[in-house]
Amino acid sequence: MIDDTRDILCDLIAFPTVSADSNLELIAYAADHLGALGARTSVILDETGHKANLIASLGPEEDGGIALSGHSDVVPVADQDWTSDPFELREENGRLYGRGTCDMKGFIAASLAVAPLFAERPLSRPLHFIFTYDEEVGCLGARHLVDEMGRMETRPSVVIIGEPTEMRIVEGHKGCCEYTTTFTGLEGHGSMPDHGVNAVEYAVRYVAKLMELREDMKRWAPPGSRFDPPWTSLQIGRIAGGVAHNVIPGLCTVDWEMRPVRAEDRVRLRAAIDAYVNDTLLPEMRAVSPDADVFTHVIGEVVGLEPCDDNEALRIVSELTGSNEVDVIAFGTEAGLFQELGMSAVVCGPGSVEQAHKPDEFVSLNQLESCLAMLRGLEPRLIAE
Ligand SMILES: [Zn+2]
């Protein structure tokens, strides 16, 4: 089975599915592979028609079931120094090199390689394969897919996301929300500050409020939180505005980000900062210039995966891997989106995040073997006694 996995991975790596480009060939390849095994496949195109998600299902057409999920896109290779062609699989010393080998085509290849095993058996519970687009640029594909799945009559109840965790079990990660807030004031001469609306000064007050709320968030940290830091963090990444000492700046932008430990923190913080804008800043700004404005553009809001007490996905993966050690991680995945839809989600996959996004990315054959063992172990859970 490791040979099948290697062959499939070789094919997957050859599709240069950098997020900016199309993933249709890869999705068609996976759909053909699973379709030939008798899976019900559904290819869901994005609005441009250049990218797609795939859901494929084996077994009974009913609610519930276990899903194996991975993103099909990879990060770019531009400006990286690779030993060999990143889109041609190379094997050396028990490692398979190529862009996406660990993040995360290795898991997709292993999933496709075990599929025939399940196709031959009378499954009593469905097994789903979910492959998405645009994870690396804000989980856009999964967001689209989850919206579609929300309208479906039947959907999986458990999802295993095979992001590279060295096969360690991960039950949580923070969300990642990025914003650009633009302050539009009124330019004027520095000698007459009351005749203008100083966009930089309002931006500074906004930033000060965010930093005050950041302190509040430390108190909102869930008890027993294992994240580092345990609370929702926030930081200002960039401020840009102004022309010269003696000119009232008419424009200022603030780039900031928040890493929520739970979804309600994001809602709470945004409500608090929006209230400050609407009740305090805007009335003062508009008293001088009715056209003054404060606008927050959401760059991305990737939800976190919140650890929870009753997690079927975690129980299953824990039994399959024989490990009771459960971690939280620092990087984001699509898991939180599935959790939002009521699915139980866990992250566990081959390869290390150490190699992800870097030149000479690789996954070891050992890691793929462990992954195959985990996936094969699903068999008794999908077949009636
Ligand atoms: Zn990934």
Image: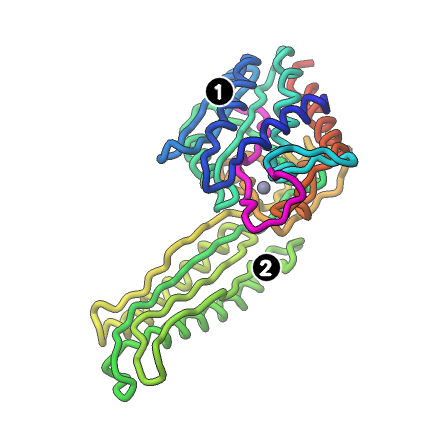
Q: Quadrant of the N terminus?
A: top right
Boundaries of the magenta span: 63-86
- Residue at x-position 39% and y-position 34%: 46
* Residue visible at 65% across and 40% down in the picture: 84
- Depth check: 348 or 283 in front? 348
Query: Who is closer to the viewer here, 280 or 364?
Result: 364
Secondary structure under the numbered disc 2 in the rendered image: loop
Q: Name which residue type carries label 2.
A: Trp
Residue 206 in picture, x, y percent from top left: 41, 70
Q: Amino acid at mark 1?
A: Thr
Decide if residue 205 is in sight here. yes
Q: Main secondary structure of the magenta part?
A: loop
Residue 80 shown in magenta = yes
Check disc 2 and report the residue beneath it.
231
Q: Earlier in the sequence, mark 1 or mark 2?
A: 1
The quarter holding residue 360 reads top right
Residue 297 badge: none
The residue drawn where x is 22% and y is 76% is 288
Q: Within 10 angstroms of label 1, few (less than 14), some, or many (20 or more) residues?
A: some
| Horizontal side, residue 285 vs residue 382: left or right | left
Q: Is residue 344 left or right of residue 275?
A: right
Residue sticking out furthest to the front: 84
Any mark on residue 41, and which?
1
> Residue 6, relative to residue 256: is it above or below?
above
